[in-house]
Image: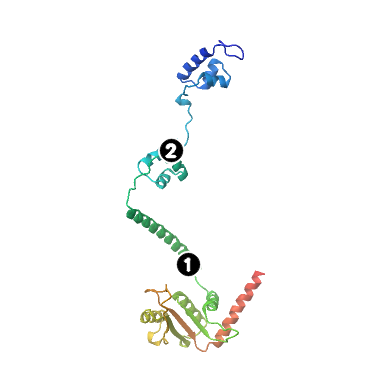
């Protein structure tokens, strides 16, 4: 070996050999072992300017993704489309292709708007399907109602929606007003459970004067199973032109008022039942 201890006497000769080995496809480690040059700085100087052989280059995992992203961008694909196809982050896509020109729009603004609306419609349909399935499962979980369960539900329903006596205005009457047909049906089933005869019930519609009063009257009469002619005189709400009402259209039918004749005793019992529910609930909270 033509070098002294600690010093390389014939550096140019070593470099010629190192370059030849490098061009023959050897790695730095192989050149080091062949020439017995163990100083890394000297080894780097010996092969300076010579590229490493391809087989020594460690491939990066994202190189193929980067090239594919650039190819897709040249085809006119958007960041979102590239991200969806390659499964990488949008920030990576932006870094890889930001030097490429923006693709020409592939559709008009109207077409873009139509696509967006179609996508929103699909999303809402999927959300509606999920909601309906949730409600269906919840409804099935109720099962059959016992008389006690209906009784408790009716007491709570009346106390939430029914007319109540006030300290400053004593009204021990049973009157219930609601616009939800399901609520009305549950309330009537509760009155049946309490053995309140239908002959003691009086029905009246409350609705805005600008609505279809006749249709609303027939709707409520059919729901509760009576002739529309037996309804009490409908209460018409005056329309305020400054108010923008949202309860309009064919689905708007106003409210139904149900009054129980000779209901003072029943009202006192309802108030007592509700008081009992509250008292027992308070003991559970302690």
Mark 1: secondary structure: helix
Q: Which residue appears at 63% of the width and 74% of the height?
A: 280
Q: Is residue 282 visible?
A: yes
Q: Position of residue 134 (x, y in %)?
A: 47, 62
**Residue position for label 2:** 66
**Picture quadrant of residue 270:** bottom right
Q: Position of residue 57 (x, y in %)?
A: 48, 28
**Picture quadrant of residue 115:** bottom left
Q: Is residue 119 above or below residue 151?
A: above
Describe residue 279's horizontal placement relative to residue 215 as left or right.
Answer: right
Mark 2: secondary structure: helix
Q: Is residue 149 above or below residue 230?
A: above
Q: Is residue 156 above or below residue 140?
A: below
Q: Which residue appears at 44% of the width and 79% of the height?
A: 255
Q: Tag 1: Cα neighbours inside 10 Å, few (<14), some, or many (≥20)?
A: few
Mark linked to residue 117: none
Residue lying farthest to the front in this orientation: 242
The answer to whether marks 1 and 2 mark residues whose Cβ atoms lie closer than 8 Å is: no
Q: Position of residue 194 (x, y in %)?
A: 52, 82
Q: Is residue 89 visible?
A: no
139 vs 161, nearest the viewer: 161
Q: Earlier in the sequence, mark 1 or mark 2?
A: 2
Quadrant the N terminus occupies: top right
Residue lying farthest to the right in this orientation: 286
Q: Which residue appears at 45% of the width and 41% of the height?
A: 95
**Residue position for label 1:** 139
Q: Which residue appears at 49% of the width and 78% of the height?
A: 187
């Amino acid at each position: 070996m033509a070098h002294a201890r600690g010093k390389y006497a014939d550096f140019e000769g070593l470099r010629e050999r190192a370059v030849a080995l490098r061009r023959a496809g050897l790695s730095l480690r192989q050149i080091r072992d062949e020439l017995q040059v163990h100083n890394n700085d000297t080894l780097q100087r010996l092969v300076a300017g010579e590229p490493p052989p391809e087989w020594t280059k460690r491939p990066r995992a994202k190189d193929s993704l980067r090239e594919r992203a650039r190819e897709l961008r040249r085809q006119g694909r958007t960041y979102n489309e590239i991200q969806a196809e390659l499964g990488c982050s949008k920030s990576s896509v932006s870094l890889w292709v930001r030097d490429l020109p923006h693709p020409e729009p592939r559709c008009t603004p109207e077409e873009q708007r139509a696509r967006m609306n179609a996508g929103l419609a699909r999303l809402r349909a999927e959300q509606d399907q999920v909601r309906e399935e949730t409600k269906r499962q919840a409804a099935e979980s109720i099962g059959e109602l016992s008389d006690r369960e209906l009784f408790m539900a009716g007491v709570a329903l009346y106390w939430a929606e029914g007319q109540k006596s006030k300290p400053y205005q004593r009204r021990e009457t049973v009157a219930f007003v609601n616009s939800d047909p399901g609520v009305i049906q549950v309330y009537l089933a509760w009155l049946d459970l309490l053995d309140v005869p239908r002959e003691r019930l009086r029905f009246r519609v409350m609705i805005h004067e600008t609505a279809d009063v006749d249709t609303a009257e027939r709707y409520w009469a059919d729901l509760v199973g009576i002739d529309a002619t037996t309804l009490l005189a409908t209460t018409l709400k005056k329309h305020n032109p400054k108010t923008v009402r949202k309860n309009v259209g064919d689905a708007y039918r106003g409210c139904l008022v149900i009054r129980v004749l000779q209901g003072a005793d029943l009202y006192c019992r309802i108030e007592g039942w509700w008081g009992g529910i509250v008292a027992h609930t308070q003991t559970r909270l302690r």
